[in-house]
Image (cartoon, helix red, strand yellow):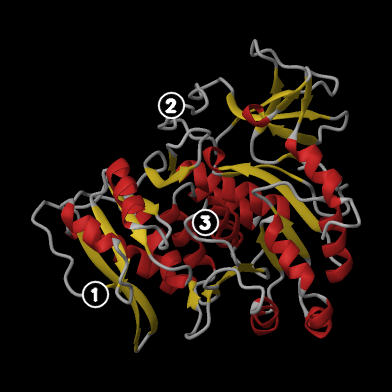
């Protein structure tokens, strides 16, 4: 018989198929955990996702439609993303945006509907109404069978509902990422893309149903959505959906929920590290087996400090939205972790290309290029986006780096951020490492 992870991958790749497979294998196991209510089991999570999708289809929303979700971090945003993706493309937006920012994103998305928290007075409501976009209220409530996340009142709609669930090549997730110009790039990711990335993270971190992730990353970012939420669900474990990162509450969550891992950006790790001395007892009682870092370069000094404090390995990874998050990762022990490296290719093929699209070897620097099942096949919408990936071609990331003799990837900076001083090329990351290594810099 195939191992569990292979059987789960065999029925994917779509969010609905993933949830259905896990609901069949361990229906009563907790999937989404949070403060203020009982955990959502895999069975209930699958049912609620289907219910959210059905309500959208009843309103005539589906297929290629884009639905913006403006919901605070937490279990409601997780449920909304999973549910919307069964019927349409979910576009999570930062609830803290201004009216002008919401106006830009809703126009760029050509959104069919906006889902907003019933408890929120977000300016997105007025912006959407002025644009003639349907505003759907989303909230949580207690019912006899447990905690429920969904729409308030009838969704309505006059259009005939699209038929069927989303297939693997349907766009599931739309995110904007900053470009080097003022206009953000719109990235469209299919179910197949994000499920492939989640599976690679599950494999890299050896996630099982015994694992629990403490998610402190925003759920309008690829790191939180795929690196924490979907990777956990792919492994059959659970994910703690917090209101967002809080160094004040972090150690309380560590004790309350007993996570086996968390994933964060380097600035968050630094803030956690600053509070270690006051929380030694909580650390001693923790169940953490590793800590993950991604989305920015982790200074070796911070990595070693976190490892000493928690006595678990810190796994640094490299990703980007266009690759549905993970591209490379350092392995868990007994595999070798190299400080300063983002690890081995994990989910994508990685090559270093020169300016003529020729692969370079022997540790020579060049532009990092990727290809694989997790890489978007839809050209990012912005003037400075990298070239569209062809079926057999490489996607140029815009990052400079090299592969060492063991295949570990090192990143030296962004092409457009390199400083040319008197003909000598200097990467900003090199300056950062020197400054962080100075005793006068905290």
Which residue appears at 42% of the width and 31% of the height?
382
440 lies above or below 317: below
Q: How many numbered marks are there?
A: 3
Packing grade of label 3 (10 A; few <14, some 14-19, many >=20) is many
- Residue extending farthest to the top is 356
201 lies above or below 322: below
Label 3–label 2 contact, CB within 8 A: no
Q: Quadrant of residue 268?
A: bottom right
Residue bearing the label numbered 3: 225
Would residue 265 be found to the left or right of residue 437 on screen? left
Packing grade of label 1 (10 A; few <14, some 14-19, many >=20) is some
Residue bearing the label numbered 2: 383
The secondary element bearing badge 2 is classed as loop
Which residue appears at 83% of the width and 45% of the height?
433
Would residue 97 be found to the left or right of residue 197 on screen? left
Q: CA gap, disc 3 to disc 1?
A: 24 Å
Closer to the camera, 350 or 22?
350
Which residue appears at 84% of the width and 56% of the height?
441
Q: Quadrant of residue 421?
A: top right
Q: Quadrant of residue 290?
A: bottom right
Image coordinates of residue 74 in percent, x first then y, are 48, 71
Q: Earlier in the sequence, mark 1 or mark 2?
A: 1
């Amino acid at each position: 018989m195939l191992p569990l992870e292979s059987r789960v991958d065999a029925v994917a790749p779509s969010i609905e198929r993933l949830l259905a497979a896990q609901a069949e294998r361990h229906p009563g196991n907790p999937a989404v955990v949070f403060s203020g209510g009982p955990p959502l089991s895999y069975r209930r999570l699958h049912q609620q996702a289907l219910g959210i999708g059905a309500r959208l289809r009843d309103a005539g929303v589906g297929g290629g439609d884009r639905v913006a979700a403006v919901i605070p971090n937490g279990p409601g945003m997780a449920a909304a993303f999973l549910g919307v993706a069964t019927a349409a493309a979910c576009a999570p937006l930062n609830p803290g945006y201004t009216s002008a920012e919401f106006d830009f994103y809703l126009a760029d998305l050509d959104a069919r509907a906006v889902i907003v928290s019933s408890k929120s007075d977000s300016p997105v409501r007025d912006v959407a109404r002025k644009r003639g976009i349907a505003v759907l209220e989303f909230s949580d409530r207690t019912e006899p069978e447990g905690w429920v996340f969904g729409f308030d009142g009838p969704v309505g709609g006059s259009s005939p509902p699209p038929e069927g669930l989303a297939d693997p090549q349907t766009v599931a997730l739309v995110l904007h990422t900053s470009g080097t110009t003022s206009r953000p790039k719109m990235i469209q990711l299919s179910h197949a893309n994000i499920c492939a990335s989640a599976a690679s993270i599950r494999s890299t971190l050896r996630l099982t149903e015994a694992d629990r992730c403490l998610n402190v990353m925003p759920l309008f970012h690829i790191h939180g959505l795929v690196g924490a939420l979907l990777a956990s669900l792919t492994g059959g474990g659970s994910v703690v959906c917090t209101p967002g990162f809080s160094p004040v509450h972090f150690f309380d969550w560590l004790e309350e929920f007993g996570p086996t891992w968390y994933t964060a950006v380097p600035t968050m790790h630094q803030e956690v590290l600053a509070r270690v001395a006051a929380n030694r007892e909580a650390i001693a009682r923790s169940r953490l087996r590793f800590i993950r870092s991604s989305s920015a370069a982790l200074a070796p000094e911070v990595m070693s400090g976190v490892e000493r404090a928690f006595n678990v390995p810190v796994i640094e990874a490299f990703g980007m939205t266009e690759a549905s998050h993970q591209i490379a990762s350092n392995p868990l022990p007994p595999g070798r972790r190299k400080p300063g490296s983002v690890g081995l290719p994990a989910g994508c093929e990685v090559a270093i290309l020169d300016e003529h699209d020729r692969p370079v070897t022997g540790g020579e620097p060049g532009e990092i290029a990727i290809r694989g099942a997790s890489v978007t096949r839809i050209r990012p919408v912005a003037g400075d986006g990298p070239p569209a990936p062809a079926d057999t071609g490489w996607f140029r990331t815009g990052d400079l780096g090299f592969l060492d003799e063991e295949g570990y990837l090192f990143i030296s900076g962004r092409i457009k951020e390199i400083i040319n001083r008197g003909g000598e090329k200097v990467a900003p990351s090199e300056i950062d490492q020197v400054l962080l290594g100075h005793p006068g810099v905290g």
